[in-house]
Image (spheres, rainbow, N blue to C red):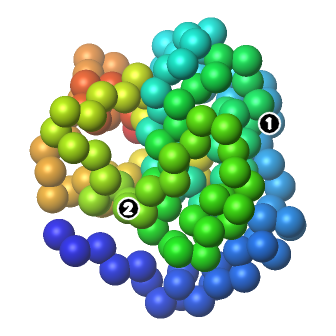
């Protein structure tokens, strides 16, 4: 499946610097709760895959934590990704990709997968080409890891 960023998204996020300056961040309590649910709260050096990282609003909160996470920040929009890279966040690797085309090799392992601004349907639509596996709680497992979104459990 070849992913093409919709023209409205391509055009709408062209001014990534302005977007980053005006878009509010996420509540730190929500971040802690999410990381606790994923089992990486307090896990030093955990490897986290962030899908749809944008300019890094959620990424910054992960980096600010004491766990020193290794973060693979995946973002399809070049300008948004450039804004994220401009921040030079410690422990963050910025990668081009999306939920339908994750830039991971078959041997790559992550401890958690997050998507701060994705809905359940957006993630499932993006993963539709591959097999979606769920655990006994109905949460999507990606490479054997629970996948949660800020906007709701999948």
Q: Considering the image in quadrants, where does the N terminus appear?
A: bottom left
Closer to the eye: label 1 or 2: 2
Residue receiving disc 1: 27
Indicate whether 119 appears above or below 146. below
Q: Considering the image in quadrants, where does the C terminus appear?
A: top left
Residue at 25 percent across and 25 percent down: it is 144
Image coordinates of residue 151 in percent, x first then y, are: 58, 45
Image coordinates of residue 45 in percent, x first then y, are: 54, 19
From this viewpoint, is residue 11 visible?
yes
For the residue pair 49 and 27, the one nearer the viewer reads as: 49
Q: Can you name the residue that lies furthest to the right here?
A: 22
Q: Give the SS element for disc 2.
A: loop
From this viewpoint, is residue 146 visible?
no
Mark 1, Cα crowd under 10 Å, few <14 / some 14-19 / many 20+, is few
**Residue 58 shown left or right of residue 119 in the figure:** right
Residue at 44 percent across and 56 percent down: it is 95
**Contact flag, marks 1 and 2 (Cβ < 8 Å):** no
| Label whose residue precedes the other's in the sequence (1 or 2) | 1
Image quarter of residue 111: top left
**Residue 102 shown left or right of residue 10 in the figure:** left
Image coordinates of residue 7 in percent, x first then y, are: 47, 90
Image coordinates of residue 98 in percent, x first then y, are: 38, 60
**Residue 117 shown left or right of residue 18 in the figure:** left
Indicate whether 138 appears above or below 19. above
For marks 1 and 2, give the CA distance: 26 Å
Residue receiving disc 2: 97
| Residue 80, numbered label | none
Indicate whether 40 appears above or below 57. above
Image quarter of residue 84: bottom right
Residue at 19 percent across and 33 percent down: it is 107
């Amino acid at each position: 499946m070849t992913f093409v960023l919709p023209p409205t998204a391509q055009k709408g996020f062209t001014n990534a610097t302005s977007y980053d300056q005006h878009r509010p961040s996420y509540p730190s309590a929500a971040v802690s709760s999410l990381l606790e649910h994923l089992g990486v709260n307090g896990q030093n050096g955990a490897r986290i895959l962030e899908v749809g990282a944008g300019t890094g609003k959620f990424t910054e909160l992960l980096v600010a934590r004491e766990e020193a996470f290794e973060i693979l920040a995946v973002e399809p929009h070049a300008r948004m990704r450039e804004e994220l890279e401009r921040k030079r966040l410690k422990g963050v690797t910025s990668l081009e990709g999306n939920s339908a085309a994750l830039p991971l090799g078959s041997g790559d392992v992550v401890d958690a997968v997050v998507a701060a601004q994705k809905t359940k349907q957006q993630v499932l639509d993006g993963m539709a080409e591959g097999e979606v596996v769920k655990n006994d709680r109905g949460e999507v497992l990606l490479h054997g890891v629970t996948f949660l979104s800020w906007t709701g459990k999948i």
